[in-house]
Image: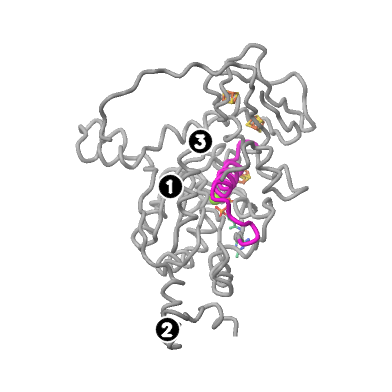
Amino acid sequence: MVEVKTADQLNKKFLRDGMWPTIFCNGCGHGVVLEYTLWALEELGWDMDKTVFASGIGCSSRMPGYINADGLHTTHGRAIAFATGIKAANPDLNLIIFTGDGDCAGIGGNHFIHAARRNMDMTVIMINNFIYGMTGGQLAPTAPLGSIATTAPYGNIEPPFDICNLAKALGANYVARWTVTHPYQPIKSVKDALSKKGFSLVEFLAPCPTAFGRRNKLGDIKKHWEWYDNNTILIEDYERIMNYGTEKEKEEVKDMFPIGVFQDLNNPGFFERYEKLVDRVMGGSPKTPVKAKAVVQK
Amino acid sequence: MIEVNEDWCKGCRICIERCPVNALEESDKMNKRGVRPPRLKKVNECNYCRLCELLCPDLAITVFTDDKKKESRKTLLRPVGGRK
Ligand SMILES: Cc1ncc(C[n+]2csc(CCOP(=O)(O)OP(=O)(O)O)c2C)c(N)n1
Ligand code: SF4
Ligand code: SF4
Ligand code: SF4
Ligand SMILES: [Mg+2]
């Protein structure tokens, strides 16, 4: 049941005292992602004492610090590895990872790949602002072609990383991408991702007016936010146009970012398989299953 | 009614620009940061949709449903058709 009805009540319940307002720049999308996640948590009614946030390094990785729950601010790119360890030590905990595009798709790419492949029980919320925001705007592996960064002053020539496609190919149970500019779909999507067993990824396309927008001439905050509305398309519409549209319609949408839910499966997560393995090896009967946790704790 | 935690507002104007009925404006008072937090216009059509509250990157706005305003009458029109 939802007991919290207003942002004010939400703030009182979830925010860490004395940490607000955030360090995020004016018009930054990170605060919005944080708020959507809190609404999703409120709707789920999760016990915050059983919820752990982990993050790496970057503006996005500051997010756990603002939430009144246990959090681990780890080293650059390694949040998923730390989270795997936490989950192994205590499978009863719910793991939420806040990470940036540089943190997750750049330096932490391999951790991400293997967590998705293992269908590791956790939710990764990757905030993609197409750039390394915190360090002043170096080129990220997610940067769109032609975009300008301090390390790509003449425009990016490298094809960008589609992290959702990657997670999908690796068999992650839940994969979705949204922008921060509309609240309802992403709140529901984060809720669905959190409720999933196995690996779930929600990617947010989020404005970074300071390091990305300014350099790429996206205009003021209003125009920068509108850019996300004008350059994204629901995956269902994208596929319909690509399959049945006219050449003109296809031309119009071919470079847009598809958003929506890309994968929604119910395969067993890593820990379900692990518990079964422990059961088999330790000879536990179905009536008295040996808890994987007990074994790990020895 | 909307309530603004004025010192949390960074003045991005997202709430003002994205309100579907253009009900918000900058107030005439500056906060500590030197920006003008939003307020409801004197005459406004706010329908408590809560979009401003949900989009504010700094969680600075809270929307309270105003009981005094009458709820608009529900339409009797029922769409027929569709797949379900
Ligand atoms: C091992 C290591 N290498 C490099 C850095 C410098 N560094 C700090 S944040 C960052 C990029 C973060 O980018 P992203 O994850 O996209 O976060 P954003 O700030 O854009 O949210 C880098 C390269 C570091 N802290 N540690
Ligand atoms: S640098 Fe960019 S990502 Fe970092 S807080 Fe500022 S706007 Fe947000
Ligand atoms: S609640 Fe909706 S209508 Fe009212 S000010 Fe906010 S965005 Fe505008
Ligand atoms: S959206 Fe929030 S931070 Fe931005 S102007 Fe409105 S109240 Fe201030
Ligand atoms: Mg980034």
Give the letter of the chain under mark 2.
Answer: A
Q: Quadrant of the N terminus of chain A?
A: top right
Ligand 3: give its quadrant: top right
Q: Residue at x 39, y 67 (%)?
A: A268
Say whether mark 1 and mark 2 are on the same chain: yes
Q: Residue at x 58, y 43 (%)?
A: A2
Q: Report which residue position mark 2 lands on.
A: A285
**2 and 1 marks in contact (CB < 8 Å):** no
Q: Report which residue position mark 1 lands on.
A: A177
Give the letter of the chain under mark 1.
Answer: A
- Rendered position, B59 above or below A266: above
Real-space CA distance between mark 2 and mark 1, rounded to the nearest whole angstrom: 42 Å
Real-space CA distance between mark 3 and mark 1, rounded to the nearest whole angstrom: 12 Å
> Between tags 2 and 1, which lies in front?
2
| Amino acid type, callout 2 | Ser
Q: Secondary structure at mark 2?
A: loop
Span highlighted in magenta in the image: A26-50
**3 and 1 marks in contact (CB < 8 Å):** no
Real-space CA distance between mark 3 and mark 2, rounded to the nearest whole angstrom: 51 Å
Q: Residue at x 39, y 18 (%)?
A: B76
